Amino acid sequence: MLDLIEDCDVVIVGSGFSGAVIAERCSSELGLRSVIIERRSHAGGNSYSEPDPDTGIEVHRYGAHLFHTSNRDVWNYINRFTGFTDYKHRVLSVYRDKIYTMPINLLTISQFFGKHMTPPEARALIEEHRAEMAGKSPSNLEEKAISLIGRPLYEAFIRGYTMKQWQTDPRDLPEGIITRLPVRMNFDTRYFEDTYEGLPVDGYAKIFDRMLDSTNIRVLLDTDFFALKEKIEGLGKLIFYTGPVDRFFDYRFGQLGWRTVDFERDLINRKDFQGAPVINYADETVPFTRILEFRHMHPERKYTEDKTVIFREYSRAAGAMDEPYYPIGTPADKDMYDQYRTLADAESNVIFGGRLGTYRYLDMHQAIGAALATFERTIKPRFTAPSSERIPTGMQPAA
Ligand code: FAD
Ligand code: UDP
């Protein structure tokens, strides 16, 4: 194994989109050889999908992954490795036994207040409901949500769901989490607003097979980088590291806070369980946050089994042995991350990338965009430019 590493130009830790883009670019554009070290038994990171063994339905092993972007370069790049279906994501939310569309739009508002509303009528009503925030700038998720949609809608659709998802009072959460959700004064019920959206025609795993299909790229599965760290560092190769940044430095300043998700799988003996891919449950009394039914993500596929498979999602703080999914990002986390970042920036042969390496929530298109930028700005010059023009390693720049 070490011989392979000795012979390569770049060592990549992690085979998610961040690592796969770097390996693919290094190979296709510069003819460089990379070794990808992957702890899991498959490539693809958290975006990995596979057919469910009982139903053949394509399921996303680490939670629903919907591809969407407005970045044309990222869209053109990823389309080299897959076609996309015309799937457009739509979500419903159950509150007190009634069902609404999510994110909040004119239909949600009309249904919730029991009356057909025009855009000006809805705006006027929300204006009244958010009066308590007039003249104040929001400093946390609760205040931000109230300033966007007013208290009644916040208390129905956001507070309970957010409490369950983050197990943190929305007053202690950063406002950025809620600005991911649009609020619309029209009847557009799509979840995302991006120009391009769809699901990979043959699933996510095939994208990684195609990206990594080169004699220049070797993937070592079931291999933890930390079992080899000192030896690899001793070889002096460039390392692109997409594992957790705190672990790289042996948790010197403590453990960064993450949330994890438990997926409760249920095999159902009928074709359709809930009639939609994702239904959120807003009430705090319902213990799970949402139910995924992957059958509905590929309506173009003719699944023949009279069975379906669903996953209930339960969210909780991640312990040391859990998969870290969402960075919590409390002020204490941010201070700790700044300390790790200082150490990372001082590393001369290591680039920290991806969502775990930079302690940031990144959608797939953002992870791809950031990795493409890192390749162009940091990695390519290192192998092609005179040393005076090279950009130092350390933390990956934002895309
Ligand atoms: P990852 O995919 O996490 O890859 C990191 C890899 O590093 C993993 O394979 C891991 O096993 C490996 N690794 C870690 N430590 C080590 C080690 N010590 N040794 C060897 N290997 C190691 N994005 C969207 O665009 N749309 C969505 O709908 C969406 N839904 C999501 C839902 C959930 C529940 C989650 C958690 C994320 C979602 N995302 C979504 C985000 C998406 O998963 C990320 O953008 C993507 O995974 C980022 O890729 P990455 O390579 O940076 O990280
Ligand atoms: N959110 C909510 N109610 C919902 C959906 C989302 O309160 O029905 C909040 C919640 O705090 C969540 C955030 O909006 O963390 C962002 O939602 P998103 O769908 O992006 O979360 P993800 O799918 O990434 O878990």
Image (cartoon, rainbow, N blue to C red):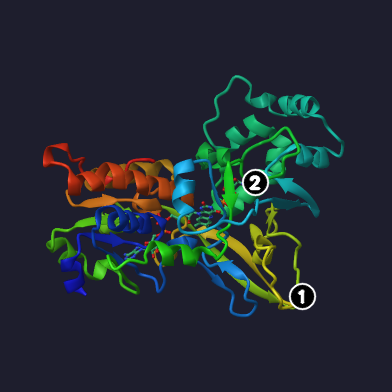
Is residue 328 visible in the rendered image? The answer is: no
Tell which of 114 and 136 is nearer to you: 114
Q: Residues within 10 Å of mark 2 (few under 14, many from 20)?
A: some
In the rendered image of this protein, does residue 137 appear above or below residue 99? above
Residue 372 point in image, percent of width and height = 36, 47
Tell me which corner region of the image, top left, top right, bottom left or bottom right, holds residue 143. top right
- Residue 277 placement: quadrant: bottom right
* Structural crowding at the residue carrying mark 1, measured as other residues with C-alpha within 10 Å and reported as few (<14), some (14–19) or many (≥20): few
Residue 341, x across and y down, in percent: 28, 44
Residue at point 13%, 58% (across, down): 236
For the point 29% across and 58% down, the residue is 27
> Residue 114 at what x, y percent from top left?
86, 39
Q: Residue furthest top?
A: 135
Please name the residue that numbered disc 2 is placed on.
Answer: 191
Where residue 270 is drawn, which disc sits there?
Answer: 1
Residue 148 horizontal side relative to residue 6, left or right:
right
Q: How many marks?
A: 2
